[in-house]
Amino acid sequence: MGKDGDLTFIHCADLHLDSQFKGLAVKDDHWAKEMRESTFIALEHMVEAARSKKVDLVVLAGDVFDSDERSVRAQFRFRDAMSRLGEDGIPCYIACGNHDPLEDWKDSVRLPENVHRFSAAGDAVRFRKNGKESAHIAGVSYPVRDVHEDLSPYLSPDDRLFSIAVLHCNVGSDDHAPYSPTTKEVLIKRGFDYYALGHVHGRGILNERPHIVYPGNTQGRHVNERGVKGCYHVTVRGGVVSAMEFIPLSPFIWGRCEVDITGHPSLDSLIDSTDLSQAGNILELEFVGRGPLDSELRDHDKAEDFASLICSRSGARLARFRVKTRPELDLESLRQGKDLLASIMRTAGGSEVDDVRDHLKRLPGANRFRKWIDAIDDDELAEIVDEASLLLADRLLEDRG
């Protein structure tokens, strides 16, 4: 079997086993422990998928573990998972990343014989199917955490076989640290048929023929890693990738939802009309809109209780919430008046963001907060100005009444 052969494999990356979820520990220690277990559950789901689909092999593109302080439990759980793959004759090929560089792998827990861990110099293995060579699998591991050179030149394809490159790298993403940065153009020129990438936690197929693929991580670890996480099941027919199936693995799914209070006179009216069951099971809520409920949501404890209730009604948990609602005030009408309130509101509402920033810097003692003032982006500062205008309007209307 050569370049025109058939092959199936699972491409997985960024398991981050035993991730601490420290932010959740502050909120709920029991919840944090459940989340910590979720990374192992995602691993188990991957193994189950590999066995049920009878894949030929598995590639893991870095960050199997979350840190160099990996627990003995994490090491044994991973070893046992690999052993179950081995029971079905499924080999696993691992490239170590910045969270699990070679220097941090402990030899005290030996991996089973079906696992191949690529070296820091880069090496390759020929995979045999039914006694015939059917794939060339090359990979390179990080020797230490901080690797800022392009590692792809360490690897070479075999033109006679379907060639897979296993790399933990950054291909043009501004959202992730530039570990082993490279480009799509560079990878295409290397000549591999499939690039099994890791490091970027959002999944995506950057190119086809050759396929350059990020499966994303297997379990979202915070609210910015939203949606279902998992791995790819890749099918090769006649030496060409013929199918890419995404397999969900994550037991917990982060989501973000807006809850609009507009038109709702009471909390029970709002909750009866809100369905978040399709959004995920760990949610960030943002209350928006205008209405009489704004005054109730300005009470932080009440707002948190209500946000938790909305989530629980949909079978989810509340990660955090924000209140960006507005009272039932027609600011434009207020600004059109001829009294002192109208004059003040026109001044507050007509302020440009840059003018506000400059004014803040001129306030007494502002030098101590200059970095903070500069760090606020324009949209956030505009929201602060709007919020201040509404609070000012509320106060002035109270005094006038």
Image (spheres, helix red, strand yellow):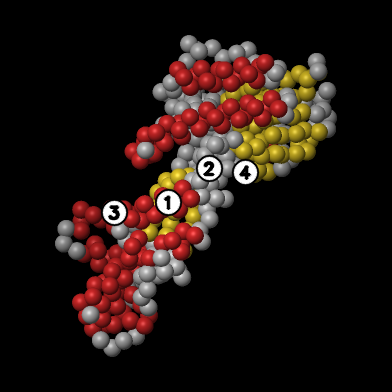
Front-most of 296 and 389? 296
Which residue is identified by label 1? 309
**Residue 78 sits in quarter:** top right
Give the number of marks: 4
Q: Of tags 2 and 4, which is closer to the observer?
A: 2
Mark 2 is on which residue type? Ile
Q: Residues within 10 Å of mark 1 (few under 14, many from 20)?
A: some
Residue at 25 percent of width and 77 percent of height = 397
Mark 1 is on which residue type? Leu
Q: Of tags 4 and 1, which is closer to the observer?
A: 1
**Residue 96 sits in quarter:** top right
Q: CA distance from mark 1 to mark 3?
A: 35 Å
- Residue 380, horizontal then vertical, whole percent: 37, 60
Which residue is identified by label 3? 372
Left or right: 154 as drawn, with respect to 105: right
Which residue is identified by label 2? 253
Mark 3 is on which residue type? Trp
Residue at 45 percent of width and 42 percent of height = 222
Q: Of tags 2 and 3, which is closer to the observer?
A: 2
Q: CA distance from mark 2 to mark 3?
A: 33 Å
Disc 3 element: helix
Residue at 37 percent of width and 38 percent of height = 28
> Which numbered marker is on residue 204?
4
Disc 2 element: loop
